[in-house]
Every structure is written in C-alpha cells, then in structure tokens.
Image (tube, grey):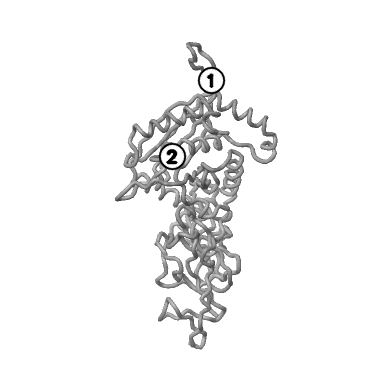
Amino acid sequence: MGIEVRVPRLGWSMEEGTFLGWIRQEGELVRKGDSLFVLESEKAAQEIESFDEGILRLLSDGPRQGDRVKVGQLLAYLLAEGEVLDPQSSSSRVESPAGMPVKTNGSLIAPPGTAGSLGKAVGQEAGSHSTGTTSPARVGHAVHASPRARRRARELGVDWRQLTGSGRSGRIRERDVLVGAGQRIERRLPHSPTRRAIARRMIESQQVTAPVTLTTTADATAWVAFRQDYLRSNPSANVHCVPSYTDLIVKQTARVLEAHPMLNARWENDATVLYSEIHMGIAVDTEAGLLVPVVRNVEKLTLNELALRSKELIEKARKGRLTPDEMAGGTFTVTNLGLYRIDAFTPIINWPECAVLGVGRIHKQPAVVDDQIVPRDLMTLSLTFDHRVVDGGPAARFLHALCERIEDPVKGGLV
C-alpha cells in the first residue's frame, strides 16, 4: 500500500518551513531510518527520517529547493515494488499494476510535533546520496562522459573509460579526468542546508534592521578574581560544571536587561514589543556552522543552574542534536570570540531580536589606576543594536551599566 510522505511539524509553533532538497532520489529504495529530505524551520535545517520503507516516487508538482511548504503538505509516496503513481493525480491516488486504485494509509514520515533527526550528514548538499560515495561510471556495459571530459582526456592522454565518475548516475566530468591525470584542481565545498540558512538569516538581519555598534572596554580584574574565588569556595562546581566567562557575562547581561528593557525587545510595524522574560541566545561555533541555542528565563537561574544548562545546550549543538525549540524564542544574544584572541568585532543582530553583545578576550594590559600604571585584566564589549528600537543614549547606558557590574561582580548580582 502506498505511504504518503508529508511535511512534519518541527516544533509546536511551526506552520510552514523551507524545503531544502531531497536526499533520496526518485526511484530509490528507502528503508526505515533513512534520511529522506532536508527541511528548515527558523534557523534549524534538519534531515527528516523515514518511519516506513518503499520505493520513493516524487510528485510532478512537488516543491523545489527553497520553496516554502506547509505542515502536512504532500511531497511524495513510498510505494511497494510493482506499484505505480497515478499520472492523472499527484495528490491523492496510487495505482496497482492492474490500474486499480490503492488506498493510502495517510501516515506521515515524521508525525506532527516531532523533530526529524539532525545527524552528521546535515552538512551534505541537499539532493546528494547520504552515503557520500561516488557512483560507478558504468551502467550495464556503457560508460558515460561529458564532451568536455572526453576532450580533456584526449589532451592529457587519459583513458577516461577507466575512471570513476562523480557526476549524476556516475557520469564522468572534466574534474574526474583532471584527478585521474594527477592535476591539482580547485576544491569546492557545497553549501550545506545549515550554511544556507545562516547566510539567509544574516542577510535578512542586515536588510530589516538599522544596525549600529557601540564598543567599550571593561576592567575585568575583579571579575576574573571572583571566578577564581567562586571555584575555590564551590569545589563541586569543578566536578559537575565550571561556570565559564560566557556564563558570567550571560548572567550579568540578564541582570542589566531587567533595568534596561528596551534592549530586550523587538520591532513590529505598529509597536515595539517588550519581552516579559529574558531568554538568552549563546552563539556556538560548530562543524555545521554557527548555531544559537537559547537558555530560557536566565534572570531566574542561579549561576550553577545557568552553567549546567548552557553546557548541556552547547554540547548538543556541537553534536548536531539541538531541536528547533531549543534555538527558538531568544530575546537577546551573546557571542564570545575571546577564546580566539579577538579583541573587538561587529556582531550581527539575531533578528527578530533587537540587540546582540559581542565579547572579546580578557587581556592583561597596563592601565592607569589612582594615577599609577598597573596591570589589569581588560575586556572589550561590542553591542550591536537596532536603531529603530533603541537610540544611542539608552544603548550606551546599557553598556555602561554592564561594565559597572563586571567591575564589581558581587554588587553586580553574580551571587
């Protein structure tokens, strides 16, 4: 019996998503657990697994890469061997070999409310086979090569019939001939679904906001000492989870946002919406690209609770196991490049949020304190904000208040 392949719901609030391409191809045998296609919701690009098996038959009017699709929309069928798709209807009928209609069971590849799997293969080019291997160049006894490949093979004296093709259905391309001749060729890295999603979000942010960046330097000497004292007085933190400097800045930023709510807001056409809760996004560098898991209600968490939750989310991000809900609903984002010896940079707003804080490295430098030159741990902060929502004065006061909390961490609410 034919099985319908429909768009799943990746998160409770999802109504539609972006179809990023098929992983399995028309006519391929699909087994349970195989990745079928890539679907994007918000910033999460996920491979959707099959819960059933059969031969994949695509709809003639099915979506193309980049099309918006609605939850529940029919995409394809999984057919048993011998079944054929009715050419007269691409939306509801499957026919048996005798031409009699076969009733579909209406099951989804991934049921509403569940997320597809996001595994190691998420970086593959949409539409490629999930194994990542090249196909043999021979179909039966025929060998296929493009005209350019044949011409280049003649020029280089290469027997292209002995090569393995990397093109569609194992077709030999010019690059295969060059590899066979031992020549260096350019390396092409196909854009993964996650990379395309990041690019689209960055461009969208620049197009719909009026970004301005303010930069200042905070004296983090007392901040560094506080963390060292905290670890000594909380030995269990060394075993379970050590609060990072990112955890410290996230916690103190949440405290400052409570007093400066205009930075914890979003722009709408007819109003500025102030969030009643503080959900902090933490930018994480992963093999798949930049991901931003969200720690919810940071203002209500202790430092230990925040450290445990952020550690859990960061590990899931780097293993490719974040769910769309864990990257949705942020109200403010922090991105820390201090680990890479970066002092200052211009972060891009994680729209629809109105601001993002960039954190540079803590670097011991000479500073003037009470007319004396002394070594101090200094840190650069870069705040990019949407000038439609916040003017320069309130944004500057926010940064000033944050610096004061960093310079006096106990008074600043870290404990």
- First in residue order: circle 2 vs circle 1: 2
Disc 2 and disc 1: Cα gap in Å? 26 Å
Instruction: Residue 233: give x, y in percent of width and height.
Output: 67, 30
Q: Residues within 10 Å of mark 2 (few under 14, many from 20)?
A: many
Figure check: 177 above or below 206 = below
Instruction: Residue 91: give x, y in percent of width and height.
Output: 43, 76
Q: Nearer the viewer, residue 1 or 338?
A: 338
Residue type marked 1: Arg
Image position of 165 (left or right of 65): right
Image position of 120 (left or right of 40): right
Figure check: 52 above or below 137 = below
Instruction: Residue 178: give x, y in percent of width and height.
Output: 51, 51
Q: Quadrant of residue 20?
A: bottom left
Per the image, label 2 sits on a secondary structure element best described as strand
Q: Which residue is mark 1?
A: 376
Residue 356 is tagged as 2
Most extreme residue toward the top is: 371
Per the image, label 1 sits on a secondary structure element best described as strand
Q: Nearer the viewer, residue 345 or 96?
A: 345
Q: Nearer the viewer, residue 325 or 82?
A: 325
